[in-house]
């Protein structure tokens, strides 16, 4: 069971799992290229993500992080290279198969994308019903309870999003993602707009989710405190490629100026 929020994050609990099983590759980006006219946003971008691994992609504004995420979820088609998600080459998939594959991916958007006119319970039920998991109807209440407990907000089930704080809305958005038990979660700037304490709690929660569900996460973040807390590996996107990758500590001590400037 995950620690109830908003318990202070224990740095030890937020550390990388010591004996994590990282044998399986769940996402492969091989020499991915994407241009818009003369704007060559991605050129030869290569990166792997393993099961139970959190990879954070760093990059300057406009470097192509969102384009990369859109390519991974099949909203944009790369001009070059190959993207394999859970063993499936995206370029070969029909719309229907791509939709099925997306059911194994969770997204946490910067905006949270909660439905304001729905209660927390209805927000959580929405993805279940959209995925036509009708056979699970009997379990729905339990799934909602478990997902809310995972994010430490079991008592908010009948509230409206407008009644919640920014940090609570982020947690509910994560609960809504977790309810489908995704194998990979994509986080887009998960701590943007939150105060430092709440941001740290969300970072701890990202770690807790990883440890409880063995999920892999592909995380876009500018918040270096979040990066330090959640990343097993950091990849730097520059000039359209994976300019450098390593642990937070490795990159933080790299003398290369282009890497160093993110860590000062
Ligand atoms: N649909 C599109 N059509 C044309 N150009 C696009 C499109 N989507 C993105 N771009 C361009 O691709 C480049 C990278 O954009 P992207 O949004 O991926 O940057 P980012 O790294 O996510 O930036 P930020 O950190 O500011 O969100 C930008 O020059 C942008 O104008």
Image: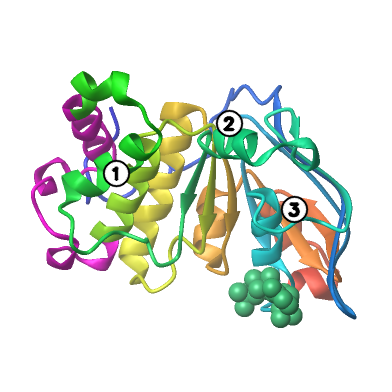
Ranked by sequence position, the earlier of labels 1 and 3 is 1
Q: Give the range drawn in magenta.
A: 141-167
Ranked by sequence position, the earlier of labels 1 and 2 is 2
Front tag of 3 and 2: 2
Give the camera-side residue of 113 and 145: 113
**Residue 78 location (% of width, % of height):** 81, 56
Q: What residue is pinned by disc 3?
A: 250
Are discs 1 and 3 less than 8 Å apart at CB? no
Q: What residue is pinned by disc 1?
A: 126
Which type of secondary structure does the marked residue at label 3 adopt?
Answer: helix
- What's the distance in space between the residues labelled 3 and 2, CA to CA? 20 Å
Q: Which residue corresponds to the image point at 20% horizontal and 46% vertical from the top-left? A: 122
Residue 48 appears in the figure: yes
Give the camera-side residue of 127 and 245: 127
**Residue 24 location (% of width, % of height):** 70, 24
**Residue 3 location (% of width, % of height):** 26, 37
Q: What residue is pinned by disc 2?
A: 52
Splitting the image into four quadrants, where does ligand 1 fall? bottom right
Chief SS of the magenta region? helix
The magenta stretch spans residue 170: no
- What's the distance in space between the residues labelled 1 and 3, CA to CA? 42 Å
Quarter of the view holding residue 144: top left
């Amino acid at each position: 069971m995950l620690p109830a929020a908003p318990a202070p994050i224990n740095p030890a609990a937020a550390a990388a799992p010591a004996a994590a099983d990282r044998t399986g590759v769940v996402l492969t980006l091989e020499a991915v290229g994407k241009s818009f006219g003369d704007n060559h946003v991605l050129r030869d971008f290569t990166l792997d993500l393993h099961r139970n691994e959190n990879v954070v992609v760093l990059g300057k504004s406009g470097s192509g992080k969102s384009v990369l995420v859109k390519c991974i979820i099949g909203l944009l088609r790369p001009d070059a290279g190959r993207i394999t998600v859970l063993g499936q080459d995206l370029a070969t998939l029909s719309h229907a198969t791509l939709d099925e594959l997306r059911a194994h991916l969770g997204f946490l958007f910067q905006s949270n994308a909660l439905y304001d006119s729905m209660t927390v319970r209805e927000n959580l039920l929405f993805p279940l019903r959209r995925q036509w998991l009708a056979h699970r109807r009997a379990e729905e209440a339990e799934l909602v309870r478990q997902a809310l407990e995972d994010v430490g907000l079991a008592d908010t089930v009948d509230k409206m999003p407008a009644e919640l704080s920014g940090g609570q809305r982020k947690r509910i958005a994560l609960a809504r993602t977790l309810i489908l038990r995704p194998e990979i979660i994509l986080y887009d700037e998960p701590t943007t707009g939150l105060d430092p304490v709440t941001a740290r709690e969300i970072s701890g929660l990202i770690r807790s989710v990883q440890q409880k569900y063995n999920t892999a996460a592909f995380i876009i973040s500018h918040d270096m405190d979040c990066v330090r807390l959640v990343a097993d590996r950091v990849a730097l996107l520059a000039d359209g490629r994976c300019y450098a990758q390593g642990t937070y500590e490795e990159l933080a001590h790299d003398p290369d100026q282009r890497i160093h400037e993110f860590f000062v």
